[in-house]
Amino acid sequence: MNITLDINGKATTASIEPRLTLLDFLRDVAGLKGTHAGCEHGVCGACTVLLDGDAVRSCLVLAAQAEGSHITTIEAVDGADRQPGELSIIQDAFCETHGLQCGYCTPGMVLAAKTLLQHTPAPSREDVREAISGNICRCTGYVQIVDAIMLAAERLQGRNQPADGA
Amino acid sequence: MKAAPFDYIRPDTLDDACACLASHPDARIIAGGQSLVPMLAMRLARPSLVIDIAHIDGLSAIRDDGDALVIGTMVRQAAALSDPLIATHLPLLAKALTHVGHPPTRSRGTVGGSLVHADPSAEIPLVAVALGACLRMRDSDGDIDFDAADFFIGPMLTLIPPTACLYEIRFPKPKAAYVGTGFHEIATRRSDYALAAAGAHIEADAHGRVQDIRLAIGGVSDFPQRLPIDLPTDLAKSKSSLAAAIDTALDTVDFVEDMHASASYRRRVVAELAGRAISDALNEITAGLA
């Protein structure tokens, strides 16, 4: 079947088998390898993307089901107006707080965080834990990931300034 | 973890979906896909045709029908969780929904899909059984109604005819002056499959006399089930005789055992959770009276 998906604001058309997941469409058809394939049955959260602004597991959505929706992947986590290689506020916070080690879960964590901060700009640590409860990380022990999202929340509320005021 | 090949169709009407089901005996309906897609990926399900009902008008609505709150089968769990009608009229469902999966599965998973999938540890079926919901489905001959109490017959097994499609769930609205609810579950990790879960919905009259106690448990046997609980109508006496009443009711349950928990552990845990759920509900009524 022929489908057209809106991925990061760009229409991508392809002839696919109905069994193709959104995850495989993103990685193998659209060539966007930032969305990571982990368990491929909805347990780990590595493949999290935004579908019409809400975090979903792309391995649990058939590409055909996503037709007509807007998909956002880690490649466009902060819109298209940044320079290539420049990090978004959420990504920057993950670096600063050491919220990643191997990085495999990180795209999913960042997108789960983005959904949370859109709906809840000033979350509690418990809100953050709930938002990433479906994302498994085997490196960090989660504490620094929660730190990262709390830091990003603070900066996104307009306090994105160095601590010394310089 | 790749599904076997299947055909995919996206009908515009419920009757078209039913016609597809009638002509393809091994077809499967996909709603949110949060249970079906993993089953396809692991090839536990190998339908020749997948029928996507997401584009059928009217299946995603929640409406107040006077005596009942009617929830369309395609209502996403996240939408149900933030719905003011559900928060007002079905507080037990609102509490249970916070335990259903994770935010990214709730944004796709549907109320109807969870009911038809019938996982023994799922929260929405437990609430449907507790509240005596009516599951309304359609096949090519017309509408069929099932009482949730009779609908679940085993793990992932229900009475739904192979040619029928669930399209709405009718939850009776509470009529009493005061309503109290409680929901508790234990899982190995937050939002994982419940090893034991209990939900209570209690109605009391204007004087605080208990009129109706609806307790259901899940995760401990082959399907969610309602437990008959006999308590005095007096609130204070109800609290003191609670543990014995729950213990008696649990004698009728056939507890399951697996690698995660023994049958005796499940019985002990669900007794505690049921006690907490009923206590929460009674405390809400007491707070309402104050």
Image (cartoon, coloured by chain):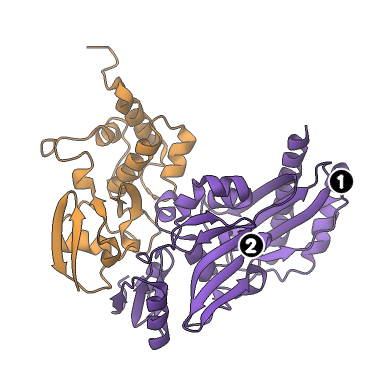
Chain colours: A orange, B purple
Location of the C terminus of chain B by quadrant is top right
Q: State the image quarter where residue B148 is shown.
A: bottom right
Residue occupying the point 64% across, 62% down:
B218
* Of residues B79 and A137, the one drawn nearer to the viewer in this rendering: B79
Q: Secondary structure at mark 1?
A: helix
Q: Which mark is residue B218?
A: 2
Residue flagged by tag 1: what amino acid is it?
Answer: Ser
For the residues labelled 2 and 1, the Cα–Cα distance comes to 24 Å
| Location of residue B9 (image quadrant) | bottom left
Residue B96 at least partly seen: yes
Residue extending farthest to the left is A83
Q: Residue furthest front?
A: B66
Position of residue B191 measured from the top left corner of the image (x, y, whole percent): 51, 52
The image quadrant that residue B122 belongs to is bottom right
Can you give x and y, in whole percent of width and height, for residue B261 in the image?
A: 62, 62
Horizontal relation, residue A18 to residue B20: left or right: left
Instruction: Tell me which numbered mark, 2 or 1, is placed earlier along the sequence.
Output: 2
Residue B217 vertical placement versus B161 (above, below): above
- Looking at the rendered structure, which numbered label has been put on residue B240? 1
Q: Which mark is residue B209?
A: none
Q: Is residue B260 visible?
A: no
In the depicted structure, whether residue B87 falls above or below residue A99: below
Residue under mark 1: which chain is it in?
B
Which of B226 and A104 lies nearest the eye of the viewer?
B226
Q: Is residue A152 left or right of residue B103?
A: left
From this view, report whether residue B226 is shown above or below residue B276: below
Q: How many marks?
A: 2
